[in-house]
Image (cartoon, rainbow, N blue to C red):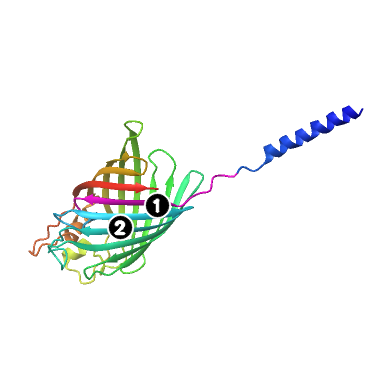
Amino acid sequence: MKKSYKALATTLALGMLAIGITAAPVFAEEEKPTADLSVSLLSKYVWRGFELSDDSIVIQPSMTVGYKGFAANFWGNMDTDQHEDYYTEGNTANWNETDFTLSYDGSMGMVDYGVGYIYYALEDGLEDTQEIYLSASLQTLLAPTLTIYRDIDVGPSTYITLDISHSLPLSESLTLDLGAQASYYSFDNGSDAADPDDVKKGDPSPDGYSALHTGLLSASMTFPVGEYFTITPEIYYSFPLSSDADDFLEIANDYDSDAKIDGETDFIYGGVTLGMSF
């Protein structure tokens, strides 16, 4: 009988031990902070269809630190030969923009989302401004992503983009990354960005520009170099999506001193980005 009790006790003890081991919590590996550093060398600086450099290489460094969905980014632009028709300090190398972004990214089911704040620090007498933004992306084919930006400072306006992207595997470590974007731009006040039709008519109180704005096509390929470094050649094509956008950008990008309005509205540009992540 004692042996039976001992056997039963041993069996119960082993059973409880097994249950305890099975029920023991599994602790996930603690998430660590991340850091990404990069520098891009591009043939032109084009932002939302606006030509912000001409016939010069631009150098654009970027640094991002992230932790548990939160991130802070510093980004800058140095024009190696500022055009005299663009800036007061022409024909010289100049650091003319620094952007600071705070963001949070998360996911709910099949939807990835992001919210953020951007501060644009501009040089050469241009006023700094600020934006907030909200984005949502579906975890499905082409990863369609809708992003809404709102300028809350100097030039009250709303900028909306719809992006799709796809990666074509070329080998175990290489992919060809393709992207396409369509945008809509709407300014609250004509004093910040006027409707081109009102400008042509000489309207003294023009409405704010509001139209289907630009398209942007991109292609890139990232080559890993060791464990932490990458080299990414990239190319872009920016173009207007409507006649209003074409007229608006023709005026906005006309930096020549002659009376003819003939600014460029579509651009092919590219370069290479050197990156480091850890």
Q: Hey, what amino acid is under mark 1?
A: Ala
Picture disc at residue 35:
1
Q: Single out the mark in the foreground, 1 or 2.
A: 1
Q: CA distance from mark 1 to mark 2?
A: 32 Å
Q: Hey, what amino acid is under mark 2?
A: Tyr
Q: Which residue is mark 2?
A: 185
- On the image, the x and y values in percent for residue 42 come to 21, 50
Q: Secondary structure at mark 2?
A: strand
* Quarter of the N terminus within the rendering: top right
* Residue drawn where x is 84% and y is 29% of the image: 7
- Mark 1 Cα-neighbour bin, 10 Å: few <14, some 14–19, many ≥20: some
- Mark 2 Cα-neighbour bin, 10 Å: few <14, some 14–19, many ≥20: some
* Residue drawn where x is 24% and y is 51% of the image: 242
* Residue drawn where x is 18% and y is 53% of the image: 57
Image-quadrant location for residue 142 = top left
Image-quadrant location for residue 197 = bottom left
Q: Is residue 214 left or right of residue 166?
A: left
Q: Earlier in the sequence, mark 1 or mark 2?
A: 1
Image-quadrant location for residue 252 = bottom left
Q: Is residue 17 left or right of residue 255?
A: right
* Residue drawn where x is 35% and y is 38% of the image: 166
